[in-house]
Image (cartoon, helix red, strand yellow):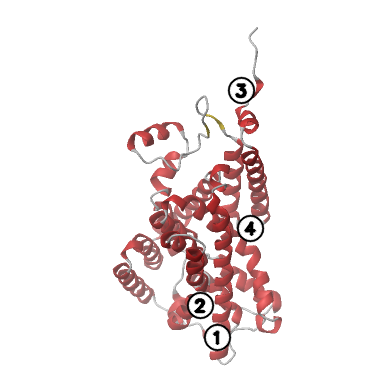
C-alpha cells in the first residue's frame, strides 16, 4: 500500500508548515483579522457592506495557500500582477476571481460603478442651498490630504506615491482606488487595502474625535429644518451637467469618476425608474460586494509584509485624523459666522466617506440632544458626498 502524505493532501497546512516564520504569523493574524471583520461588520461596529465580504476573502485567501508548482506557493483566487496577454490568458483559466479583478477592478471600472450608484442615491439639494458654505467645509475636511502629502514625501515616498496615500484623507474609497491605480500602480493594492480598512474604522473612531473636540452643549444645537428650501428637478439636472462638464474640462484624468457620479444624479432627477432601481440596487450593491471581496482576497500575507505597508498604515490614519480635525474646524467657523445657529458637528460630514460621516454627525448630535436634527434624512447623503 503506497504511503500517504497527509500534508500533501491538505496543502493549506503544508504551505503553512513550510513557510518562513514571519509568513506563518502573518497568515494566522490575517485569518483571525478577517474573522474579526466579519463579526464586527455583522454586529454593525464596522461598515457591513464592505467588511463582511472583505473579512471572508481575507480569511479564505490566507488559509488557501497551496503549491502551484514544486517550489512555488500561491492561491487560485487571482494574480494582481498579471499583465502580459499570455500570462493573463493563463490566470483567467485558473483563478476564479481573475475575470472580475481584470475587467472591473484593475482598470478602475468598479470605482466608476460605485460612483454612479452613489450619484443615484444622492440629493444635491443641500449643496445648492449654500454652495459656498458647503465647499468651504469640504475644503477644510481635505486638510488631511493636503498635509499628509509633504509628510509622506519627507518620509521617503515619491510624489506620486505620496499623493496616492494622501488621498485617504478624502475618505473616498473609490477615489483612492482610482488615484493609486493611475499614480502608483506598484502600491495600488496595499494603498487601496489601507484606505478601505481605515474608512470602515472611521465609523467607530470619528465619534470619539467629535466628543473630544466639541462640547456636549454645542453638539446638541438644534438646527431648524425649515431653513431648507426645495429645488426643481430641472435646477438640479442643470447644476449636475454644468458641474460635470466643468470638472471634466479642468481635471480630465478623473473624468470617468465625474461622469459616473453626475450621470447617477441626472438619472435620479430624471426619474427614469428602471435605471434608478437598477443602478441604486444591483449595480451599487453588486459593485460594493465585489469590491469588498476582492480587497479581502488581495490581503495576502506576502502583500501585507511589504516594508512600505507599515508606513502606509501610519500615513493613512494620519490623513484621516487630520481631515476629521479639519472638518470640525470648518464646522466651528461656520458656527461662528452664522451667528451660532449651525451645529459644528456638521463639519465632520465634510469628510466624504459616503454616507458614513453624515450618519456619525447626525448620531452624535442626537445623542447630545434627542431633538437635534442637523442633517435631515433626505439631505444627509448629499452633504456627505
Mark 3–mark 2 Cα distance, whole angstroms, equals: 57 Å
Label number found at residue 46: 4
Label number found at residue 333: 1
Mark 4–mark 2 Cα distance, whole angstroms, equals: 25 Å
Mark 1–mark 3 Cα distance, whole angstroms, equals: 65 Å
Q: Which of the marked residues, 1 or 2, is nearer the chain's N terminus?
A: 2
Q: Residue under label 3, please give it.
A: 8
Residue at x 37% of width, y 41% of height = 83
Check the image and report above or below for 82 versus 282: above
Q: Residue under label 2, please give it.
A: 140
Q: Which of the marked residues, 4 or 1, is nearer the chain's N terminus?
A: 4
Q: Which of the marked residues, 1 or 3, is nearer the chain's N terminus?
A: 3
Residue 262, position in %: x, y?
Answer: 38, 66
Q: Tell me if residue 375 can be seen.
A: no
Mark 4–mark 3 Cα distance, whole angstroms, equals: 38 Å
Left or right of 173: which side holds 341? right
Amino acid at each position: 500500500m503506497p504511503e500517504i502524505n497527509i500534508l500533501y493532501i491538505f496543502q493549506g497546512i503544508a504551505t503553512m508548515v513550510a513557510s518562513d516564520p514571519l509568513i506563518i504569523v502573518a497568515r494566522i493574524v490575517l485569518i483571525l483579522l478577517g474573522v474579526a471583520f466579519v463579526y464586527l461588520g455583522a454586529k454593525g461596529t464596522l461598515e457591513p457592506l464592505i467588511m463582511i465580504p472583505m473579512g471572508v476573502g481575507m480569511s479564505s485567501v490566507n488559509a488557501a495557500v497551496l503549491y502551484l508548482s514544486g517550489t512555488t506557493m500561491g492561491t487560485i483566487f487571482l494574480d494582481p500582477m498579471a499583465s502580459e496577454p499570455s500570462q493573463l490568458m493563463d490566470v483567467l483559466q485558473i483563478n476564479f476571481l481573475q475575470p472580475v479583478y481584470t475587467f472591473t477592478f484593475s482598470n478602475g471600472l468598479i470605482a466608476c460603478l460605485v460612483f454612479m450608484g452613489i450619484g443615484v442615491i444622492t440629493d444635491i439639494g443641500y449643496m445648492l442651498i449654500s454652495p459656498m458654505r458647503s465647499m468651504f467645509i469640504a475644503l477644510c475636511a481635505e486638510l488631511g490630504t493636503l498635509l499628509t502629502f509633504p509628510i509622506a514625501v519627507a518620509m521617503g515616498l515619491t510624489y506620486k506615491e505620496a499623493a496616492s496615500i494622501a488621498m485617504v484623507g478624502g475618505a473616498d474609497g473609490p477615489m483612492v482606488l482610482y488615484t493609486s491605480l493611475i499614480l502608483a500602480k506598484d502600491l495600488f493594492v496595499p494603498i487601496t487595502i489601507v484606505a478601505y480598512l481605515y474608512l470602515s474604522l472611521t465609523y467607530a473612531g470619528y465619534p470619539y474625535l467629535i466628543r473630544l473636540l466639541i462640547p456636549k452643549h454645542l453638539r446638541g444645537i438644534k438646527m431648524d429644518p425649515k431653513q431648507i428650501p426645495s429645488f426643481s428637478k430641472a435646477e438640479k439636472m442643470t447644476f449636475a451637467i454644468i458641474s460635470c462638464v466643468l470638472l471634466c474640462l479642468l481635471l480630465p484624468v478623473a473624468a470617468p469618476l465625474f461622469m459616473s457620479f453626475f450621470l447617477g444624479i441626472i438619472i435620479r432627477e430624471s426619474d427614469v425608474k428602471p435605471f434608478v432601481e437598477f443602478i441604486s440596487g444591483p449595480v451599487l450593491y453588486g459593485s460594493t460586494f465585489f469590491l469588498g471581496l476582492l480587497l479581502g482576497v488581495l490581503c495576502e500575507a506576502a502583500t501585507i509584509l511589504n516594508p512600505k505597508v507599515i508606513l502606509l498604515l501610519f500615513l493613512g490614519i494620519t490623513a484621516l485624523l487630520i481631515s476629521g480635525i479639519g472638518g470640525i474646524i470648518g464646522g466651528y467657523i461656520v458656527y461662528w459666522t452664522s451667528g451660532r445657529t449651525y451645529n459644528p458637528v456638521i463639519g465632520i460630514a465634510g469628510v466624504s466617506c459616503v454616507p458614513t460621516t453624515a450618519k456619525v454627525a447626525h448620531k452624535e448630535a442626537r445623542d447630545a440632544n434627542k431633538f437635534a436634527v442637523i442633517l435631515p434624512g433626505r439631505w444627509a447623503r448629499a452633504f456627505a458626498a
